[in-house]
Image: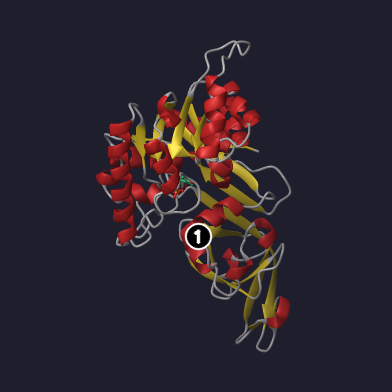
Amino acid sequence: MPQSQGTSNANLLIDLKSIEANWSILKELNAPSSTAAVVKSDAYGLGVNKIIPTLISAGCKTFFVATIEEAIVVRRLIAENKILVLFGINTFEEASTCIEYNLTPVLNHLGQLEIWKKIVSKDDKGIGRPTPKEAWLHLDTGMTRLGFPNEELEAIKTNPELINNLNIGGVMSHLVCSENVNNPINAAQLSRFTKIKLWLESYIKFNAMWSLANSSGVFLGPAYHFDITRPGAALYGINPQPEKKSIMNEVVRLQAKILQVQRVDTNQTVGYGATYKVKKPGRIATIGVGYADGYMRAGSGFAQAYIGDFRIPVVGRISMDLITLDISAVPERYSHVGSIVDLIGPNYSVDSLAKDSGTIGYEILTSLGKRYNRTWEGIGNTVKN
Ligand SMILES: *Cc1c(COP(=O)(O)O)cnc(C)c1O
């Protein structure tokens, strides 16, 4: 492994080959439906600049982001592919930006629809290229967040010209409990989405793609796949079926060096608040990663780390820049100043750290610190930031 630059004690390794393999696993499961990739929030914190080329080489053609700013970043990496903006457009300016950069807005409510209608009905003389008029619709089938609520759908039903002259390239909805296979809300949303599909297709002539499933939704079975699925988390190694052993490849490894080792004895305490009391003679290692790096403070007393296959519990409070680990059980030749500790690695996944920190893998990934030396491995040359 080439040495990373920078002064940080922690290295974040992002395995692009695993991301490529994960996309291919999902693609196989989805076939004959297509598989997009959700790359919002800098590809869940892992670096959209590196991940877009990886997904393109895997065969992915459709990308979802949250904001127009994110979409422009992706557009600068790829000329042709479809980029969908989940937040849609809220102003005429945003709508023209979508047209300028050939971005496809996901329209979430009537207000957005009206702005889009006005923009695309205008002649685009002066822009100098064909106007990409495609937009998607997002229907709310239970999230009560973004998407057309029922009464706005009724408005379209009684007034089909609202969408008649638009180029609706896709219609989507988002699942509320897809990671919980047995939750009846899944089937209820599926049934609602299917009903809307039937009546929309009977009222209005359009040739839209339909999309319901996120990562976990893919695993609910083909009935949930429709024309295209929208996985994010599973691409980045988060287990889409939390009740089963993951079939996804781990993507992230977070390693840090031991900064200092102290011998401790009974009655000593470790860290702020003296929350950890030493019960027998042992050794405590300090590492330069803390909650300012997205290593969640709520994991104090619960999170684990590893030196090779030796488990070393995080003891005492996680502080801003430092954590303390009980390394008493690890032979000293493996646990001295400079020894490498896995904070996330083969023995301890993003999901495990998340669970022990009272959160989900999504939050761990999107919080990964700016101070880490990041190295992207695989696909051509290893690259560094
Ligand atoms: C984030 C998001 C996804 C991806 O969800 P994962 O659980 O990460 O696979 C799909 N669709 C929408 C609307 C989203 O906001």
Q: Position of residue 218 (x, y in %)?
A: 33, 46
Q: Is residue 374 left or right of residue 225?
A: right
In the image, residue 36 sits, relative to residue 236, either above or below, namely above
Instruction: Describe the element under mark 1 as helix, strand or loop.
Output: loop
According to the picture, the residue beneath numbered tag 1 turns out to be: 360
Q: Could you say where residue 312 lies in the image, as x and y percent from the top left?
A: 54, 70
Q: Residue at x 55, y 56 (%)?
A: 363
| Residue 301 on image: x %, y % | 58, 75
- Looking at numbered disc 1 in the image, what kind of residue is underneath it? Ile
Q: Nearer the viewer, residue 154 or 106?
A: 154
- Report which quarter residue 95 is drawn in: top right
Res 17 seen here: no
Name the residue located 35 percent from the left edge and 42 percent from the top edge: 26
Q: Nearer the viewer, residue 89 or 235?
A: 89
Above-or-below relation of 276 to 242: below
The N terminus sits in image quarter:
top right
Residue at the image position 28 percent from the left and 33 percent from the top: 202
